[in-house]
């Protein structure tokens, strides 16, 4: 492995070693990325792109980093290549779909989650979130609960007049509120006749209950 | 008697006109997201020319829960229950893989007994997953009986998990640096008993379908994936080996002491649906072999990393009697296992393929970034290439042969 790394470093002197707890890792400047990956694939036997992902460093510059995990199906070794993506809030990175077909979906995911534009990608659409979703959820400034957004379908929007709500972090249908009396926040605690179907209009204290629209669903 | 001459006109021209008339436009149909053949909430937008698929666009994300975002907001041990819900057909293997990935960042090696228990868990998960994969695949091809055989025996595997960790389905059995608890007394004997019951089921399944003429017609030569395609599309697990690429991380990059076990890695030759079936059947036999060896060689000793005081929680009896352990327990519960800053990418050979975790730690009990490389996600990305050219009834067969789980694909 060591000798192999030496030949790689000799062939690509612009690679800078990167800290890693397991396999060798290098930082690669973005303008040399395609040459580097192509040579690693064709000449150094790293024929399998195991994973492609991004990291949001938030307050550091450059903010985004795209990370490639390469694997050699012959020598059974890993190699990690990372490249910085300048440009916040619209980072750009060259697409490696010409080298590995599997990068297609991985890059779509990185675009979906981080908003990284992969230039040269044949079909850069969202993959996990729906088309037209306005945010990139894995960016650090995006809240864990999510944000209120409109339904993507116009008909649905008009018919229901509702929106996609953030996940209830507290006091939602699956979380008991931490304040107030036990009987209020967990009605089953003192009322054995309580069940899901019972009309809940008689409960006067609104304060510790989930928002009205969530209760309406039940 | 006169013979009457009938004039049919120009038959060729009429046939051509009729073809024009009936040809029409191509038809778009949606399969899923709620369709029994798609094994979950996968949606396929397919374009049909008659019965032949000309284009296929998979739509995923209906089960997206934002696991990676959630992971950035909780401690490593708190995330273990979430890993159950990735590949929920073999949840205990995800627990093990995640624990191994975090231990890799921490540079921690668990003791041999813990490794052997984890190996048994992994192989049980493989059996559990393949039993479903194989049984449901039979159903996809129209052979309902096989499913009954495999599901009956799978129930016994669930009993084993119940004995082991109290839960049948969502096991959450591992912890960073060890396990939730040691194996219960007599459990290994029960494992062997179940293995003895399981073996005839695999043989029976094999006999029912492997040389079945109808099954051949449905699977042989269907959904061929070449070696180069399989590597380029990032297929892993039985799907990659079915195409003849001998990559099995248990052999190639051994973890958990897999190098000490004697087992074979089956590979296919033509990369069609039938080969992927054969690989799964043989892998089950090999898993039984590994489990028997692991039970035989089960070492004594600690079942968690005793020296990792800031990672694995102390035993309960010590917590209740000693001040130092009490503080240690408190710190671990409130702040999580203390993992040093660093990054590592660890993959293990899960039943569905290679499951990888890329852990970026900036120190402390919470990961800065956790990327889950799920095998089903990568395996499904070949659908736009694989499905066109096949007829609609082949689609369930193709999907079944890939053996994916949407919980893991969408994360």
Image: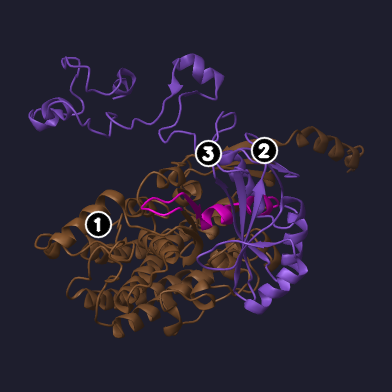
Chain colours: A purple, B brown
- Expressed as whole percent of the image width and height from the top left, the position of residue A58 reads 54, 40
Disc 2 sits on a residue from what chain? Answer: A
- Expressed as whole percent of the image width and height from the top left, the position of residue A84 reads 65, 49
- Expressed as whole percent of the image width and height from the top left, the position of residue B364 reads 38, 53
Tell me which segment is drawn in magenta: B362-389
In the image, residue A33 sits, relative to residue A203, either above or below, namely below
Is A178 left or right of A110, judged from the image as shown?
left
Disc 3 sits on a residue from what chain? Answer: A
Residue at left offset 64%, top offset 70% = A72
Residue position marked by numbered label 2 in the rendering: A87
In the image, residue B11 sits, relative to residue B377, either above or below, namely above
**Disc 1 vs disc 3: which is toward the camera?**
3
Image quarter for residue B83? bottom left
What kind of element bears circle 1? loop
Query: Which residue is more in the foreground, A28 or A198?
Result: A28
**Label 3 crowd bin: few (<14), some (14–19), many (20+), radius 10 Å:** some
- Say the numbered circle drawn on residue B167: 1
Q: Tell me if I can see residue B391 in this picture.
A: no
Residue position marked by numbered label 3 in the rendering: A139
Label 1 to label 2: alpha-carbon separation: 48 Å
């Amino acid at each position: 492995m060591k000798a192999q790394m030496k030949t790689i470093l000799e062939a690509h002197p612009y690679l800078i070693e990167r800290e890693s707890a397991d396999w060798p890792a290098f930082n690669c400047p973005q303008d040399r990325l395609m040459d580097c990956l192509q040579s690693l694939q064709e000449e150094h036997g790293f024929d399998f792109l195991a994973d492609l992902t991004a990291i949001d460093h938030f307050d550091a510059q450059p903010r985004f980093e795209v990370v490639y995990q390469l694997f050699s199906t012959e020598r059974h070794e890993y190699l990690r290549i990372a490249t910085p993506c300048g440009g916040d809030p619209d980072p750009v990175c060259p697409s490696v779909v010409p080298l590995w077909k599997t990068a297609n979906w991985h890059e779509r995911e990185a675009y979906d989650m981080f908003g990284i534009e992969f230039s040269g990608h044949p079909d850069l659409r969202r993959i996990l979130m729906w088309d037209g979703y306005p945010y990139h959820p894995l960016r650090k400034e995006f809240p864990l609960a999510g944000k209120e957004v409109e339904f993507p379908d116009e008909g649905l929007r008009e018919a229901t007049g509702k929106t996609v709500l953030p996940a209830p972090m507290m006091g939602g249908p699956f979380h008991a509120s931490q304040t107030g009396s036990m009987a209020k926040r967990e009605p089953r605690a003192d009322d054995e006749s309580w069940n899901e179907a019972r009309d809940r209009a008689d409960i006067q204290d609104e304060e510790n209950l989930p928002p009205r629209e969530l209760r309406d669903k039940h | 008697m006169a013979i009457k001459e009938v004039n049919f006109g120009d038959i060729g021209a009429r046939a051509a006109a009729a073809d024009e008339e009936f040809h029409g436009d191509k038809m778009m149909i949606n399969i899923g997201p709620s369709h029994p053949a798609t094994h979950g909430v996968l949606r396929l937008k397919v374009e049909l020319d008659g019965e032949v698929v000309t284009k296929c666009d998979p739509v995923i994300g209906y089960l997206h829960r934002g696991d990676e975002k959630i992971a950035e907001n909780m401690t490593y041990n708190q995330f273990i229950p979430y890993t159950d819900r990735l590949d929920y057909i073999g949840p205990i293997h995800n627990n093990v893989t995640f624990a191994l990935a975090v231990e890799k960042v921490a540079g921690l090696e668990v003791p041999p007994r813990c490794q052997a228990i984890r190996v048994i868990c992994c192989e049980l998960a493989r059996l559990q997953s393949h039993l479903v994969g194989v049984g449901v695949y039979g159903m996809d091809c129209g052979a309902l009986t096989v499913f009954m055989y495999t599901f009956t025996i799978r129930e016994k595997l669930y009993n084993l998990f119940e004995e082991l960790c109290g839960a049948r389905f969502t096991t959450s059995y591992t912890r960073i640096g060890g396990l939730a608890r040691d194996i219960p007394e007599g459990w290994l004997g029960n494992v062997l008993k179940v293995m003895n019951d399981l073996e005839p089921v695999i043989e029976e399944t094999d006999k029912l379908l492997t040389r079945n003429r109808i099954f051949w017609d449905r699977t042989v030569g269907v959904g061929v994936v070449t070696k180069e395609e399989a590597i380029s599309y990032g297929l892993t697990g039985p799907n990659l080996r079915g195409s003849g690429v001998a990559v099995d991380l248990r052999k190639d990059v051994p973890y958990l002491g897999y190098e000490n076990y004697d087992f074979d890695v089956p590979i296919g030759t033509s990369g069609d649906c039938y080969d992927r079936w054969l690989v799964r059947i043989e892998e089950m036999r090999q898993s039984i072999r590994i489990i028997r060896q692991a039970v035989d060689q089960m070492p004594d000793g600690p079942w968690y990393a005793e020296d990792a005081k800031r990672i694995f929680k102390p035993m309960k009896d010590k917590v209740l009697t000693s001040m130092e352990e009490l503080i240690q327990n408190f710190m671990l519960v409130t702040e999580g296992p203390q993992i040093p800053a660093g990054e590592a990418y660890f993959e293990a050979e899960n039943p569905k393929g290679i499951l990888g975790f890329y852990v970026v730690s900036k120190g402390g009990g919470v990961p800065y970034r956790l990327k889950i490389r799920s095998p089903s996600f990568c395996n499904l990305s070949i659908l736009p290439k694989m499905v066109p050219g096949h007829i609609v009834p082949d689609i369930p067969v193709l999907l079944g042969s890939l053996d994916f789980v949407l919980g893991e694909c969408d994360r």
